[in-house]
Image (cartoon, coloured by chain):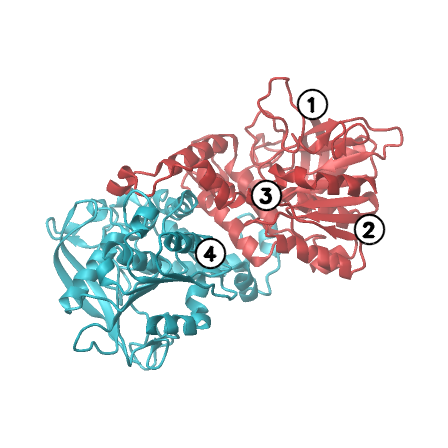
Chain colours: A cyan, B red
Amino acid sequence: MLVDKKHFKLQGFTTFNGCELPEVNIGWESWGELNANKDNAILITHYFSGNSHAAGCYQQDDPLPGYWDALIGPGKAIDTNRYFVISSDTLVNQEPFNPLVITTGPASINPATGRHWGLDFPVVTIRDFVGVQRALLASLGINRLHAVVGPSMGSLQALEWAVAFPDQVERMVSVIGMGEADAWTCLGLQQWALPILNDPHWCDGDYYHREPPLAGVQQTVMQISLSAMSPEIINRTFYTHYPLEPGPLQDIRSQHRVTQRFMQDCLEKARLADANHLLYLIRANQLFLAGHGKTLSEGLQQVQARCLFLPSKGDLLLRSGLAWQTHQLLQQLGKSSEYAEIEGSWGHLDGIYSIQTQAATLQAFLER
Amino acid sequence: MLVDKKHFKLQGFTTFNGCELPEVNIGWESWGELNANKDNAILITHYFSGNSHAAGCYQQDDPLPGYWDALIGPGKAIDTNRYFVISSDTLVNQEPFNPLVITTGPASINPATGRHWGLDFPVVTIRDFVGVQRALLASLGINRLHAVVGPSMGSLQALEWAVAFPDQVERMVSVIGMGEADAWTCLGLQQWALPILNDPHWCDGDYYHREPPLAGVQQTVMQISLSAMSPEIINRTFYTHYPLEPGPLQDIRSQHRVTQRFMQDCLEKARLADANHLLYLIRANQLFLAGHGKTLSEGLQQVQARCLFLPSKGDLLLRSGLAWQTHQLLQQLGKSSEYAEIEGSWGHLDGIYSIQTQAATLQAFLER
């Protein structure tokens, strides 16, 4: 299944905290055909380090397809013979320097000044991600979603859709998700921000014409990657690891092979990422409370969609208890909510790599 | 129960990696009386951020006693009416600037140069911690331990004692411990090192006459603290946390109250710590393989002591599976090993704060 990245330009957008963006540009992809009634659309909302490339390949010889290719395609659980499936790059996407990402954030040019936004870019929230998606859908004449489905940070967007625009969402699927960022999650996310904040090259976000804070970004990427994986997968990948390697035993500056290889992988990801975008993404997640109101209950009270929660059993980042709590609250409020756990050995990333184990659950949910 | 810190000076010590230390100074504490046969000694080995203050108070009005005061004392599970209980500060202790710690490491003066060791200090291993303890015990005429008991990094020392000096250890108790640092643990520990390595004030460890890398140390302390706790405890402590606080919503540089308070607590701990000592401690843990040989099995084959493993069920740092694996290996080798899990809500720190729930198990084990 081939796909290409399209470009959506939005003139004028007011953020949740009341700031005006004169212009927003985001990339998007789609699979399948929109029907005449425009009522067969499924929106896929992407995870923290991801983008709208959820399925298919750009070229026949791409080494890998989009991240949920096991789920999305002709005859698959999210069947592109039936549904028009669409996904867009979020605001402040982690990788503005990835040629396959189109996003607007601190690394973009502020049309008012002709310079990079930097920290003049307003703090954005998950509600803003949803707002931009809503404008994209409106531009295509789509007013109502058959479903919105997303993993991890994508689950925050999916739930926010169901809470903020309840009459536009028929089904909501939260994969490896949560309903609000608790104190623990806020602090965990702050750990991802600190390497950038402490990097002297960060310069209060004003580094676009000098050396960027690459070491900080590399460390942040390492933390994100490790949080999303499981001990089992790391140990299986580095199965020849030996604790008493001669180099590290003799010199405190020498690193174990596992560290060298992992850090090298993170450096490659870091080169596509932007430090400020990471800080803004982290903040959007820290600020998350479905409904953006006083309490989670108050938000969930708005939901009209049928809901499905698919956390990962071995998740160390967004523990299954966070999804369970939201599911329980919805049921107490008399809403329709279902819950099933993904099993696998990847930890948080089972929401991506083991999603096919819940494909039948998801397919049945979408068809009911 | 009152206690005071004593000072042990050792002339000449050869490290596991073959370097010579002309002089080692460490602090130690003891509770109870050594009997005439000198065969009633129990050694307590301390955790990463701890020191030899395992029980009792320095003064009647100390706000808190030593960390395992619930376990150690007259009539308690480790009964100071029967046993001579002793603990010592490790080499490269995290807090050389804590007036109640005596340690030798990169922040100490190298007698050969009259300057701080810095990175000229040799990389040390858990075996070296044990070697210094052994010299301290020998100076008191103690050749055989009734038991060695330690939590977390202390469990590494306890197991290393049983493997390296099997005829000197009758009982070994590993609390929230592991048998070797796997690839996952190596990378997790590296995350603790990176904030220091990336801090421009670190200067390859040569900062003793300038501004120290305090921001890096603060971030390292934050990571250690969060790893050792559970989501439940953090959320209970910061139960009024609200994700959409106005400050962080308006300004990316503004932090949530929970972050501010947590970082402030970490800053206070960071002022007592030394960046190089932290790096050396991290490395000692990364290098750990009980027996310091080719494989864990090879090491455990040496054990003569009866062993008891007490991991914490909710531990996110040293998962109970690590203790279970070591316990299983010992049993397969025909050794005597027992296993029980500590229950509580603290995560890793249940090995400290909920240890009394296994006090009876421990007491029975020590008396058999």
Q: Quarter holding the N terminus of chain B? A: top right
Give x and y (percent) for residue A256.
55, 56
Q: Can residue B293 be seen?
A: no
Report whether A178 appears left or right of B318. Answer: left
A268 horizontally vs A243: left or right? left
At label 2, counting other C-alpha atoms closer than 10 Å, the crowd grade (few under 14, some 14-19, many 20 or more) is some
| Distance Cα–Cα, label 1 vs label 3 | 29 Å
The residue at 53%/66% (across/down) is: A237
Residue, disc 4: A320
Marks 4, 2: nearer the viewer = 4
Can you say whether A225 is above or below A78 in the image?
above
Which label sits in the foreground, 1 or 3? 3
Q: Given the image, what chain letter belongs to the residue carrying mark 3?
A: B
Going by the numbered disc 3, the residue's amino acid type is: Gly
- How far apart are labels 3 and 2 at the CA level? 31 Å
Disc 3: which residue = B344
The quadrant of the picture occupied by the C terminus of chain B is top right
Considering the numbered disc 1 on the image, is that residue within a helix, a strand or a loop?
loop
